[in-house]
Amino acid sequence: MSQIMFSNTPGIFVTLEGPEGAGKTTQVKLLSRQLEALGRKHIVTRDPGGTAFGRQIRRILLSPETKLCSLAELLLYEADRAQHINEVILPALGDGYLVLCDRYIDSTIAYQGHARGIDLQIINELNRIATGGLTPQLTILFDIASEAGLARLHPSGHDRLEREEISFHHKVRQGYLEMAAREPERWRIIDSTRPMSTVQEELRRALHDKFGIPGLLE
């Protein structure tokens, strides 16, 4: 894999990021319905869990019963990502699909880097190895204050990461905002506290403005 290979693919790669409870998973489902109605070739996938192997890793990573050191957690995310890229994302891009990925490398930087405290240089290098340098053309950050996002979650269903202390979630959000500020050409920030329809409209507009996808704003 390489960035050159990606540059020669006809597809479009978009990632969706955000703190817990930001609503990105719901928003990408709504977007997918619109794309289906338009007849636009696309896939919706997620990181971790976009492959059969990845779904096993996801269960381990998010189970409240799992006890992991930070490095083991990081390496599991990267193992999932390497398989995901090779099995799903690169083939879809090569076939001209719009790939919508729920979380990607920036989640690892925010959660394992900014929140867990693992050296960002190590994370960036592992991300590069796992992905072959595959970078999204557009990253949407669904932004919400940590307290508000966590309040949206069902109290009986919190996974291992959702159960972290509030200070952890503050660091995650701050990490996202810092990344978006450093790469404004790649990132778009959407205030996800607004009504669902407004957030969906902004998401569609971001894709339309970046890629000129016809029909998204109709």
Image (tube, rainbow, N blue to C red):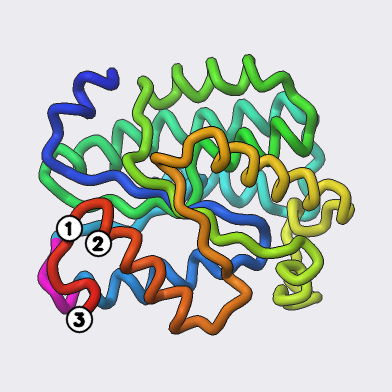
Residue 50 visible from this viewpoint:
no
Q: Residues within 10 Å of mark 1 (few under 14, many from 20)?
A: few
- Asked whether the beta carbons under mark 3 and mark 2 sit within 8 Å of each other, the answer is no
Q: Count of labels shown?
A: 3
Labels 3 and 2: the sequence-earlier one: 2
**Kind of element beneath mark 1:** loop
Question: In the image, what residue occupies the spot 57% across and 48% down?
Answer: 58
Q: Residue 132: image x %, image y %?
A: 36, 20
- Magenta region, residue range: 36-40
Q: Which residue is mark 2?
A: 208
Q: Are marks 1 and 3 in contact (CB under 8 Å)?
A: no
Q: Position of residue 198 (x, y in %)?
A: 46, 80
| Image quadrant in which the C terminus is located | bottom left
Helix, strand or loop for disc 3 = loop
Write the residue at 53% across / 29% down.
Answer: 78
Q: In the picture, residue 114 is in which quadrant?
A: top right
Q: Name which residue type carries label 3.
A: Glu
Q: CA distance from mark 3 to mark 2?
A: 11 Å
Amino acid type at image mark 2 = His
Q: Which residue is mark 1?
A: 212
In the foreground, 50 or 26: 26
> Would you place residue 74 above or below residue 136 in this image?
above
Q: Amino acid at mark 1?
A: Gly
